[in-house]
Image (spheres, rainbow, N blue to C red):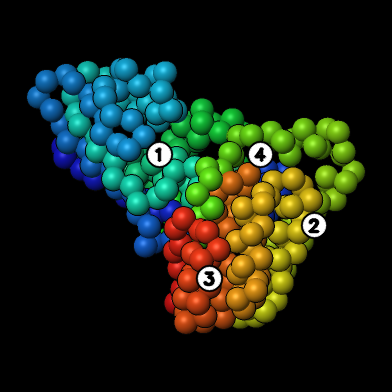
């Protein structure tokens, strides 16, 4: 083993969350300005130490903690490299807020996998990266679509259908996406289970909502290809209406969405699982995005980010 680092980035779902679990398409963007870096340094003793904001301590003692999914991945990687006894320090530096729908856990899995492959001087292709990320994502999320891992490992916006290889999608040259945090953790597992339960109790109405979400994703893709930010905004707003009916929006999300719309957003919606987490708002220009950021902070957002399309 040699000293190595692995990096990954935050992801934002533009359109298609929840419906993507049921085979509808989704569009997600890597946000290159928000990075996660895993630094792996070999040790001459046999201590395997993790240093991160989620968990700090020995790998062996991490099983009962929130780090257990990541620990499963690390154990599997160590077995794969026949290095179960290898001592190391793994430092995880993340600018991604955890549990905010930005793909923090997937970004962590991707960066750790990249760091281990680099440390063992082994080439790693995108498909294998996603297979490894699925080890911890399954442990953490139960039934992940794979969208998070695919996007946190990507450098361009992705069109994603569950079970198929994701592919890059065209984006306009103008426009800006503002991301705002409600300050409340999102609850991916709970939200996904809630939608699954709704599908059991109200199959027809719920299926219709999932189809509507898929249609808005298709419209969003057409709008992106046509550089039509107004149509893209409309697709975001229509998707938010369906997500709210699905029961995954909250008052805090709705407040921020209303504030963005009142300050000139072309469209706005929750992003990720909902039940907390972040919302996104589309602005026509970088300057209008800055106006939205200020308005969202005034409306109570605990953090905001801006991602200009160019
Ligand atoms: O909250 P996030 O960013 O982990 O997104 C979850 C997206 C869902 O569609 C709700 C679930 C999934 O696995 O795709």
Mark 4 CB in 8 Å range of ligand 1? yes
Q: Secondary structure at mark 3?
A: helix
**For mark 2, does the 10 Å Cα neighbourhood hold few (<14), some (14 to 19), or many (20 or more) residues?**
many
Q: Which numbered mark, 4 or 1, is in the foreground of this view? A: 4
Q: CA distance from mark 3 to mark 2?
A: 30 Å
Lower position in the chain sequence, tag 2 or tag 4: 4
Mark number, residue 191? 4
How far is the residue under mark 4 from the one under mark 1?
22 Å
Q: Which mark is residue 295?
A: 3
Q: Position of residue 81 (x, y in %)?
A: 29, 27
User: In this rendering, would 72 be left or right of 203?
Assistant: left
| Residue 121 shows in the view | no
Quadrant of residue 269 within the rendered picture: bottom right
Depicted 223 relative to depicted 212: above or below: below
Look at the numbered disc 4 and give the secondary structure of its residue: helix
Is disc 3's CB within 8 Å of ligand 1? no
Q: Nearer the viewer, residue 49 or 225?
A: 49
Which badge, 3 or 2, is on the more N-terminal residue? 2
> Which of the numbered marks, if any, corresponds to residue 109?
1
For label 1, count other residues whose C-alpha is less than 10 Å away and answer few (under 14), some (14-19) or many (20+).
many
The numbered mark at residue 212 is: 2
Q: Look at discs 4 and 3 and give the one toward the viewer.
A: 3
Q: Quadrant of the N terminus?
A: top left
Foreground: disc 3 or disc 1: 3
């Amino acid at each position: 083993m040699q000293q190595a680092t692995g990096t990954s980035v935050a992801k934002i779902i533009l359109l298609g969350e929840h419906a993507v679990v049921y085979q509808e398409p989704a569009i997600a963007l890597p946000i290159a300005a928000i990075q996660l870096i895993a630094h792996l340094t070999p040790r001459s003793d046999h201590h395997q130490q993790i240093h991160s904001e989620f968990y700090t301590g020995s790998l062996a003692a991490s099983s009962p903690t929130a780090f257990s999914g990541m620990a499963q991945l690390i154990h599997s990687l160590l077995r794969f490299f026949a290095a179960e006894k290898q001592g190391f320090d793994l430092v995880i530096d993340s600018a991604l807020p955890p549990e905010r729908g930005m793909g923090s856990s997937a970004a962590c899995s991707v960066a750790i996998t990249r760091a281990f492959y680099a440390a063992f001087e082994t080439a790693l292709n995108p498909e294998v990266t996603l297979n490894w990320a699925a080890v911890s994502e399954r442990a953490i999320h139960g039934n992940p679509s794979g969208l998070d891992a695919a996007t946190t490992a990507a450098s361009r916006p992705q069109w994603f259908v569950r079970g198929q290889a994701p592919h890059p999608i065209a984006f306009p040259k103008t426009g800006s996406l503002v991301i705002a945090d409600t300050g409340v953790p999102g609850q991916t597992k709970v939200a996904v289970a809630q939608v699954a339960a709704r599908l059991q109790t109200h199959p027809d109405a719920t299926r219709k909502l999932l189809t509507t979400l898929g249609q808005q994703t298709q419209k969003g893709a057409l709008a992106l290809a046509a550089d039509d930010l107004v149509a893209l905004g409309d697709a975001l707003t229509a998707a938010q209406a369906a997500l709210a009916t699905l029961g995954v929006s909250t008052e805090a999300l709705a407040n921020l969405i209303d504030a963005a719309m009142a300050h000139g957003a072309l469209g706005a919606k929750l992003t990720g699982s909902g039940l907390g987490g972040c919302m996104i708002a589309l602005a026509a220009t970088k300057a209008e995005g800055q106006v939205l950021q200020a308005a969202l902070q005034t409306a109570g957002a605990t953090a905001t980010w801006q991602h200009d399309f160019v």
